């Protein structure tokens, strides 16, 4: 268990160096199209403000190449944060680290916020450069990591800086993510069903294997299912298949059997004669996919079969869309399963945890309220690595509960 900001009683006047994940999507004109990540950081920021901490925020935005780029400045983020925290004095620094920024940090009054410029404007950020970490650390007393979505990266602002400060704790969002994701790998309520979809087996092998050690049912959907089906000897037309992973798929299926896990592969698919919104479509059994056609969604019978697994489950983990939800003709499978998981959550006391950037995008696209699920993770890659059983560097660097506190800060 990691210490959190609640484990520190006296924040008054302390300089809290807080890593947040303000990597929000922007439209062509630089406007924020979804401010979820900013809103998710508010509990931590409000708590620290109320307790009189002097708050210095660090975040990245997009992928600038280690130098300032106007398109990736945090200006819209600072403006949105100010709207969400109207009572708080918030300043956006011109740089990440510089003598001027250092002065601004020193001049902060309790309850005020200084947002550093995009940390990826510094070439040392992604290299976890000790000099950058030191420059950041010199501005703070306590490292707070609330950026779960960036915790799988050992960067200067997510990890290096933590090693240089004597106190480092999780923010409230980080705590919520760790608790929710831990609950589906440690002692989950049963029956436990995991639904793994998305495009590639290769990107999810480790998570599939790790989950087989804990789940009762493992549903594989999305494009990934076709590698499994081809591995069973079926012909899958021009569906997306990773031929180099046919052996892996066979091994995973054998491992499921060894572990007594029910591997659920959809038996019916929606096929198309092109990867296009206006393609011709048909619903067929998976053993009847004609050459030249590709599977782009699960069929109605497969929806019923998977929904039945979900209905009785007490824990559901879902990562990866079941079809090409971005195109209307192939969104029905993902939408129906989302609805089934939400209903099991409301009616059956099922704990549902969703992760994966595209899975969350699908929920948003369907206009579903994320609160209908127990937890929707803000971290795409980070949630996957967590579920693989990896210790994420941005979490590993935080102090454990029970670790001795330093004599003074
Ligand atoms: P997540 O981000 O939720 O982890 P992935 O990145 O693994 O999910 O995969 C998402 C992508 O998988 C989506 O863009 C979706 O269109 C694609 N996909 C799902 N099913 C299929 C399919 N049958 N054929 C091709 N692509 C698919
Ligand atoms: Mg994705």
Image: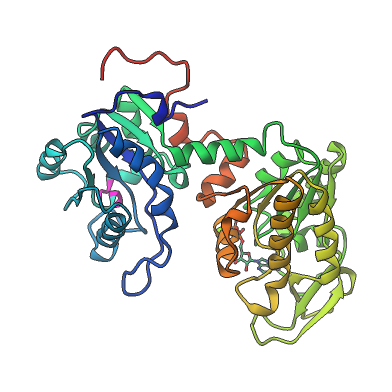
| Residue 300 higher or lower than 10, as above or below | below
Q: Is the magenta stretch mostly helix, strand or loop?
A: helix
Left or right of 315? Residue 7 is left
Whether residue 129 is visible to the viewer of this picture, yes or no, is: no
- Which residue is nearer to you in this view: 342 or 269? 342
Residue 357 placement (x, y as % from top left): 54, 57
Number of on-image labels:
0
As drawn, is 107 to the left or to the right of 49? left
Q: Is residue 22 magenta?
A: no
Q: In this view, does 9 lie above or below 297?
A: above
Applied colour scheme = rainbow
Residue at the (31%, 57%) spot, across then down: 65
Residue pictured at 34% horizontal, 42% vertical: 46
For residue 25, which quarter of the picture? Answer: bottom left
Query: Residue 183: x percent and y percent?
Result: 64, 36
Q: Quadrant of the C terminus?
A: top left
What residue range appears in magenta? 119-123
Q: Which of 272 and 106 is in front in this view?
A: 106
Please report the residue visible at 65 percent of the width from the left and 58 percent of the height from the top: 200
Look at the image and tell me whether residue 340 can be seen: yes
Location of residue 104 in the rendering, given as x and y in whole percent from the top left corner: 13, 42
Compared with 304, 173 (above or below) is above
Q: Tell me if residue 120 is in the magenta stretch.
A: yes
Across and down, in percent, residue 92 comes to: 20, 52
Q: Where ligand 2 lies, by image quadrant?
A: bottom right
Residue located at (60% from left, 59% from top): 359
């Amino acid at each position: 268990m990691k210490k959190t900001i609640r484990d520190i009683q006296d924040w008054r006047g302390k300089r809290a160096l807080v890593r947040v994940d303000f990597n929000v999507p922007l439209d062509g004109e630089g406007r924020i199209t979804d401010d979820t990540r900013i809103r998710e950081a508010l509990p931590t920021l409000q708590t620290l403000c109320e307790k009189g901490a002097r708050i210095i925020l660090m975040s990245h935005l997009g992928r600038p190449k280690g130098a300032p780029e106007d398109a990736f400045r945090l200006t819209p983020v600072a403006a949105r944060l100010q709207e969400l925290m109207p009572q708080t004095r918030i300043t956006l620094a011109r740089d990440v680290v510089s003598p001027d920024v250092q002065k601004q940090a020193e001049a902060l009054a309790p309850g005020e916020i200084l947002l550093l410029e995009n940390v990826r404007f510094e070439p040392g950020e992604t290299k976890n450069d000790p000099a950058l970490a030191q420059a950041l650390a010199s501005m703070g007393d306590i490292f707070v990591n609330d950026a779960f979505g960036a915790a799988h990266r050992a960067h200067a602002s997510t990890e290096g800086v933590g090693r240089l400060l004597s106190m480092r704790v999780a923010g409230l969002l980080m705590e919520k993510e760790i608790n929710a994701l831990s609950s589906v790998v440690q002692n989950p309520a049963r029956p436990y069903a995991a639904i793994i979809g998305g495009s590639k087996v290769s990107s999810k092998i480790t998570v599939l294997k790790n989950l087989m050690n804990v789940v009762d049912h493992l549903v594989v959907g999305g494009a990934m299912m076709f590698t499994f089906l081809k591995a069973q000897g079926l012909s899958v037309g021009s569906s997306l298949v990773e031929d180099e992973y046919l052996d892996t798929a066979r091994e995973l299926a054998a491992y499921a059997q060894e572990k007594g896990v029910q591997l659920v592969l959809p038996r019916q698919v929606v096929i198309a004669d092109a990867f296009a919104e206006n393609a011709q479509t048909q619903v067929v059994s998976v053993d009847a996919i004609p050459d030249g056609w590709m599977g782009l969604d699960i069929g109605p019978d497969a929806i019923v079969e998977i929904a039945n697994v979900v209905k009785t489950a007490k824990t559901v983990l879902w990562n990866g869309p079941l079809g090409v939800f971005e195109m209307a003709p192939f969104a029905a499978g993902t939408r129906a399963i989302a609805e089934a998981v939400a209903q099991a959550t409301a009616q059956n006391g099922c704990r549902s945890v969703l992760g994966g950037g595209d899975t969350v995008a699908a929920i948003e696209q369907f206009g579903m309220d994320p609160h209908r699920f127990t937890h929707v993770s803000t971290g795409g890659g980070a949630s996957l690595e967590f579920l693989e059983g990896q210790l994420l560097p941005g979490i590993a660097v935080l102090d454990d509960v029970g670790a001795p506190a330093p004599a003074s800060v």
